[in-house]
């Protein structure tokens, strides 16, 4: 196999199939990709330079899905339009590689100058297309020979790349030594292509739209950049990266945030990557929810890739056989007379060529996964998403804390406004007193004008003091009005936030359905907690029962469209008037009584938990906690249910089943474990939830609510 290097420009954007074809060239050949001369004489970039013992082949690769017609060196057509770049007013592919080759020869200086007459320019069409034509008479373009429109040679497809390069240089003498090739690489700063392959998809997170033809830029820690384009399905595959940390950006979408945003580090030679673009208007909390939902699809893609490693040797043999068979079918069809005018057969050949590309991709992926550590591949794929989710959770928590701080500031503003009102009232009294004093002084001054000039000056001074006090009073009154207005605005903002969070416009049937679902979950948690509380487990009520009941409050909130943390759930419990101390005391007392089985203690836990669920559902439904009378009515309904022996037996049986599930899971109380346990009892508890709802929220009670 040939040795691949990347040039001083660093960017490698060739198809994976093209890189495979270059690797299959003979051992001893050096291929330098994306070379840009280091002496600054030209800004032209060469897709690939192949150095053999006889020649230096300069290759320009072109990738077109639609048919191409090469009329001459200067006239290349695709869909009736000329194919031209933007260099010097526009060049055809042949003109481009011809001019690039001339500029490249100028960069071969010193000892490398002897290579100038050995350069051979080529244009290579990466995609074989049976409809491609050449010449004024539109002749077919067989893949097994080169085509000569004038200045450069053209290769159609990649299957015969080695044969055609060797055939063109066979008349040249062997004059390029290993020392010449080594000096060439050092002169142009070429470095060996890395071993890392990155493959995955790019999609917009909130719409799940896959981005086709999107340019991805990978920048390594050593500041070398590699680029790749996604296909029409948003998928990409990039080979040859060094095994070092790198970052990814999508330059064509500068206004969208790229997730995961952390630096990627692969520990094996394969990295499965999902990139998500986030629109600016999507909230952090929504981003976290969507990203959490994408974890499963990422895991599925990783497992699909790793599945290729199973029976890798047999799979590779089957793929090689399929490739040989498909290529033979293509060769047979190309030999059929009249192919040039047979559209159906041309389409069939193109389909087989696409099949060859797909088989080569599968062969490449199978070979890459056959020796990998599957655990490392999974970790490298999922760890960036887990880190991003952790960071998002921290930012969401910080935002919630800011909302709490805003509420506290608003409360202090209200207190300041009330104090300002009191100050205004006090100043008004003082102003009235000052006015009375000034009037008295003025009348006294008038009577004493003729008697003493000193009395007149005293009266004038008093009048000036009164005017000054009046001015201070007016200023204080204006400040008080502004403070009152600020407090009113703050109250309106708080009320608007509260109203926005409340559940709106639910019908009676919808309310009953939500209450029944909440009470079904409460019955499961209460029945399980009753059994657990009676087990000889140290601190079971604190470490198992209480987290279950807190989770219950969080889950009921989610049913009503409210998302909250465990700390927020504890605050809500305080608002509803619930404390766990009484429950813990009851459980502890019954544990001290020898021989007591499923008696009052477990039913106390069941009743407490069902009451907790009913009060929580009432709070979310009405936006306020239940009154004392409503709470007492709920308690009476729970007692009535527990007097029913059949109902009590069902509670006990369901609690035992839930306890068995908890015990099998090691008494874990993480949200995922709790959900898994309670989901197993969901259908069994549904009739119980409906019955509890009717007993606690019958038609009469519902109408009063």
Image (tube, grey):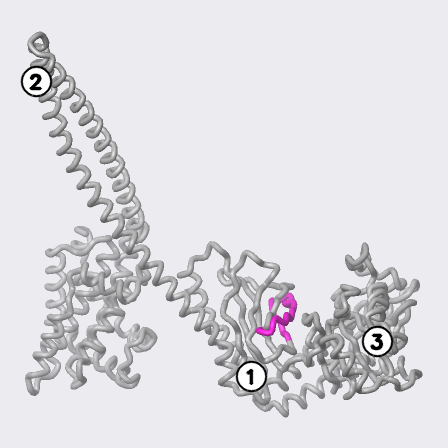
Dividing the picture into quadrants, the one containing residue 41 is bottom right
Left or right? Give the position of 356 relative to 365: right
Q: Which residue is mark 3?
A: 110
Look at the image and tell me whether residue 348 can be seen: no
Where disc 3 sits, the SS reads helix
Dividing the picture into quadrants, the one containing residue 78 is bottom right
* Distance from the alpha carbon under mark 2 to that under mark 3: 112 Å
- The disc placed on residue 268 is 1
For the view shown, which residue lies furthest in the top direction? 450
**Residue 273 belongs to the span the image colors magenta:** no
Seen from the viewer's position, the closer of residues 633 and 491 is 491
- Is the residue marked by circle 3 packed among few (<14), some (14-19), or many (20+) residues within 10 Å? few
Q: Which residues are magenta?
A: 221-238
Q: Which residue is mark 2?
A: 440
Residue 534 placed where, x, y %?
Answer: 15, 82
Single out the mark in the foreground, 2 or 1: 2
Residue 320, relative to residue 60: is it above or below? below
- Is the residue marked by circle 1 packed among few (<14), some (14-19), or many (20+) residues within 10 Å? some
Left or right? Give the position of 444 relative to 289: left
Label 1 or label 3, whichever comes before in sequence order: 3
Residue 558 placed where, x, y %?
Answer: 32, 63
* Distance from the alpha carbon under mark 2 to that under mark 1: 98 Å
Label 2 or label 3, whichever comes before in sequence order: 3
Say if mark 2 contacts mark 3, CB within 8 Å: no
Residue 31 placed where, x, y %?
Answer: 76, 79
């Amino acid at each position: 196999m040939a040795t691949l290097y990347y040039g001083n420009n660093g960017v490698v954007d060739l198809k994976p199939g093209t890189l495979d074809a270059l690797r299959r060239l003979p051992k001893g050949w050096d291929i330098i990709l994306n070379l840009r001369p280091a002496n600054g004489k030209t800004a032209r970039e060469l897709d690939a330079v192949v150095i053999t013992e006889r020649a230096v082949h300069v290759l320009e690769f072109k990738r077109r899905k639609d048919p191409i017609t090469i009329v001459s060196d200067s006239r290349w057509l695709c869909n009736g339009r000329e194919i031209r770049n933007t260099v010097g007013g526009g060049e055809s592919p042949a003109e481009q590689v011809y001019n690039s080759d001339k500029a490249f020869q100028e960069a071969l200086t010193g000892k490398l100058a002897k290579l100038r007459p050995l350069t051979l320019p080529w244009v290579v069409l990466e995609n074989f297309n049976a409809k491609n034509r050449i010449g004024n008479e539109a002749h077919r373009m067989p893949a097994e020979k080169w085509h000569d429109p004038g200045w450069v040679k053209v290769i159609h497809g990649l299957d015969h790349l080695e044969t055609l390069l060797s055939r063109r240089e066979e008349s040249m003498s062997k004059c390029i030594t290993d020392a010449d090739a080594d000096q060439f690489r050092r002169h142009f700063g070429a470095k060996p292509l890395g071993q890392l392959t990155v493959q995955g998809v790019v999609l917009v997170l909130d719409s799940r739209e896959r981005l086709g033809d999107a340019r991805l830029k990978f920048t390594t820690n050593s500041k070398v950049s590699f680029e790749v384009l996604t296909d029409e399905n948003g998928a990409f595959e990039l080979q040859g990266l060094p095994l070092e940390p790198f970052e990814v950006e999508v330059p064509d979408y500068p206004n969208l945030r790229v997730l995961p945003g952390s630096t990627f580090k692969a520990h094996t030679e394969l990295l499965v990557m999902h990139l998500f673009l986030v629109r600016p208007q999507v909230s952090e909390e929504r981003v976290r929810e969507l990203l959490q939902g994408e974890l499963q699809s990422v895991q599925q893609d990783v497992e699909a890739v790793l599945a290729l490693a199973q029976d890798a040797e047999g799979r590779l043999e089957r793929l090689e056989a399929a490739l040989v068979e498909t290529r033979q079918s293509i060769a047979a069809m190309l030999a059929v007379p009249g192919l040039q005018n047979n559209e159906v057969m041309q389409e069939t050949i193109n389909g087989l060529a696409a099949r060859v590309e797909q088989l080569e991709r599968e062969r490449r992926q199978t070979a890459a996964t056959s020796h990998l550590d599957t655990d490392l591949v999974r970790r490298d794929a999922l760890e960036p998403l887990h880190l991003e989710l952790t960071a998002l959770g921290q930012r969401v928590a910080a935002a919630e804390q800011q909302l709490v701080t805003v509420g506290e500031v608003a409360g202090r503003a209200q207190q300041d406004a009330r104090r300002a009102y009191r100050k205004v009232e006090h100043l008004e009294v003082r102003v009235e007193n000052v006015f009375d004093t000034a009037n008295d002084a003025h009348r006294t001054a008038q009577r004493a004008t003729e008697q003493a000039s000193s009395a007149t000056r005293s009266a004038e001074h008093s009048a000036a003091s009164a005017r000054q006090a009046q001015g201070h009073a007016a200023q204080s009154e204006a400040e008080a009005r502004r403070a009152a207005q600020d407090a009113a605005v703050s109250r309106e903002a708080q009320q608007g936030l509260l109203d926005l969070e409340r559940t709106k416009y639910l019908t009676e049937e919808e309310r009953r359905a939500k209450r029944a679902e909440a009470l079904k979950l409460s019955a499961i948690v209460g029945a399980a907690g009753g059994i657990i509380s009676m087990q000889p487990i140290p601190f079971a009520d604190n470490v198992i029962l209480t987290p279950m009941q807190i989770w219950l409050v969080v889950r009921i909130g989610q049913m009503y469209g409210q998302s909250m943390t465990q700390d927020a759930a504890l605050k809500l419990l305080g608002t509803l008037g619930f404390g766990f101390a009484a429950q813990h005391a009851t459980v502890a007392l019954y544990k001290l009584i020898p021989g007591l089985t499923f008696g009052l203690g477990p039913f106390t836990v069941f009743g407490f938990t069902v009451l907790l669920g009913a009060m929580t559902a009432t709070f979310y439904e009405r936006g306020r906690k239940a009154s004392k009378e409503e709470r007492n009515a709920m308690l009476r309904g729970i007692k009535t249910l527990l007097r029913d022996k059949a109902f009590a037996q069902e509670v006990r049986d369901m609690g035992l089943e839930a306890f068995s599930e908890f015990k099998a899971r090691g008494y874990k109380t993480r949200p995922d474990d709790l959900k898994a346990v309670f989901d197993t009892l969901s259908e069994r508890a549904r009739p119980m939830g409906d019955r509890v709802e009717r007993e606690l929220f019958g038609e009469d009670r519902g109408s009063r609510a």
